[in-house]
Image (cartoon, rainbow, N blue to C red):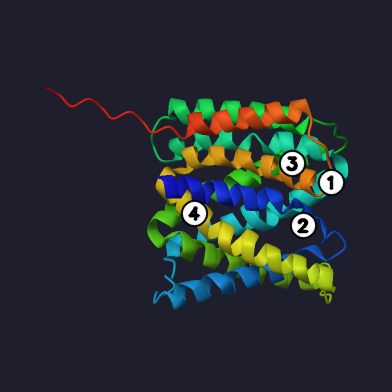
């Protein structure tokens, strides 16, 4: 369990701290940039599998729809919503709405699995959501900002929800690999007609490498390992560490100064994670 918790935490930190890196691609064609990022991530994951003497498991027919839905909503759709939401809403507002995804996972994931939501993950997720709202400071929105922020949150949740069953059957690394290749193919095909291809600058190429290796190959593999071991509801509370890592990166880079509210929000997120990750009490053995 400790390794699973550590894997989920590292994933959230990598994704949260990558926000400044993603900002380096503001002027680059979105879809083809995503295609290159995911293609690199898929190659790294495949190389990892083969180097360990393994084989890439081929999904069954019933698995392809889940992988496709994951790619459309939780990868390409999520990244697009994050990008466009910030044009109509302040980053703090987007972060606050996105922070509700742990609560969605804590409630929906058990229902999808045919069981009632557990108290600890739900309570922990509520505390995490409160911490993220305090940490982000809220913010304003206009026009479609609210809708885009909600879609961003749903995209984040779907990245885990659509993967639960297929990860159980194929394994986390295989799911991450296939999703990367599918996203690369879809992004490259659509991006050819919407945005086109463009040779990246040295700065943009560096950003694509970091996103493709650390935030895609490493983070995806670790996250699905955590989901497989902890369950989607318990692993979901670790998503709260994303804005914490983003805040830390901004402070280190000098883009933001820590405030009392931010520190309070960080503490609340930490407490929520501790609550949500508690193991279920074992059922009493009949005498």
Label 3 and label 4: CA atoms lie apart by 24 Å
For the residues bearing labels 3 and 1, Cβ distance under 8 angstroms: no
Q: Nearer the viewer, residue 265 or 216?
A: 265
Which of disc 2 and disc 1 is earlier in sequence? 2
- Please state the horizontal and vertical placement of residue 138, each as a whole percent of the image: 78, 30
Q: Is residue 162 visible?
A: no
Which of disc 2 and disc 4 is earlier in sequence? 2
Q: Which mark is residue 22?
A: 2
| Front: mark 1 or 4 | 1
Q: Which mark is residue 254?
A: 1
- Image point 46% across, 35% down: which residue? 277
Q: Secondary structure at mark 2?
A: helix
| Front: mark 1 or 2 | 1
Using the image, determine if residue 195 lies above or below residue 9. Answer: below
- Which quarter shows the N terminus? top left
Q: What residue is shown with label 4?
A: 224
| Front: mark 3 or 4 | 3
- Please state the horizontal and vertical placement of residue 215, each as a whole percent of the image: 64, 59
């Amino acid at each position: 369990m400790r390794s699973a918790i550590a894997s989920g935490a590292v994933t959230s930190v990598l994704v949260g701290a990558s926000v400044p890196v993603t900002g380096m691609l503001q002027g680059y064609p979105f879809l083809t940039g995503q295609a290159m990022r995911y293609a690199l991530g898929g190659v790294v994951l495949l190389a990892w599998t083969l180097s360990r003497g393994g084989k890439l498991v081929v999904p069954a027919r019933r698995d392809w729809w889940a992988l496709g839905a994951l790619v459309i909503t939780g990868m390409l759709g999520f990244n697009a919503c994050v990008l466009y939401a910030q044009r109509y809403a302040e980053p703090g507002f987007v972060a606050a709405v996105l922070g509700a995804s742990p609560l969605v996972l804590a409630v929906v994931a058990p229902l999808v699995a045919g069981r009632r939501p557990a108290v600890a993950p739900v309570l922990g997720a509520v505390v995490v959501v409160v911490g993220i709202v305090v940490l982000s400071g809220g913010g304003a929105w206009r026009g479609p900002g609210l809708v885009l922020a909600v879609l961003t949150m749903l995209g984040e949740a779907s990245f885990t929800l659509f993967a639960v069953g297929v990860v159980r059957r194929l394994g986390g690394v295989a799911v991450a690999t296939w999703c990367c290749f599918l996203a690369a193919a879809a992004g490259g095909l659509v991006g050819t007609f919407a945005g086109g291809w463009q040779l990246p600058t040295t700065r943009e190429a560096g950003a694509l490498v970091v996103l493709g290796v650390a935030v895609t190959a490493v983070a995806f593999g670790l996250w699905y390992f955590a989901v497989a071991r902890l369950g989607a509801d318990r692993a979901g509370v670790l998503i709260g560490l994303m804005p914490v890592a983003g805040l830390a990166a901004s402070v280190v880079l000098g883009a933001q100064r820590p405030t009392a509210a931010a520190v309070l929000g960080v503490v609340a997120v930490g407490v929520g994670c501790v609550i949500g990750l508690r193991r279920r009490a074992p059922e009493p053995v009949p005498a």
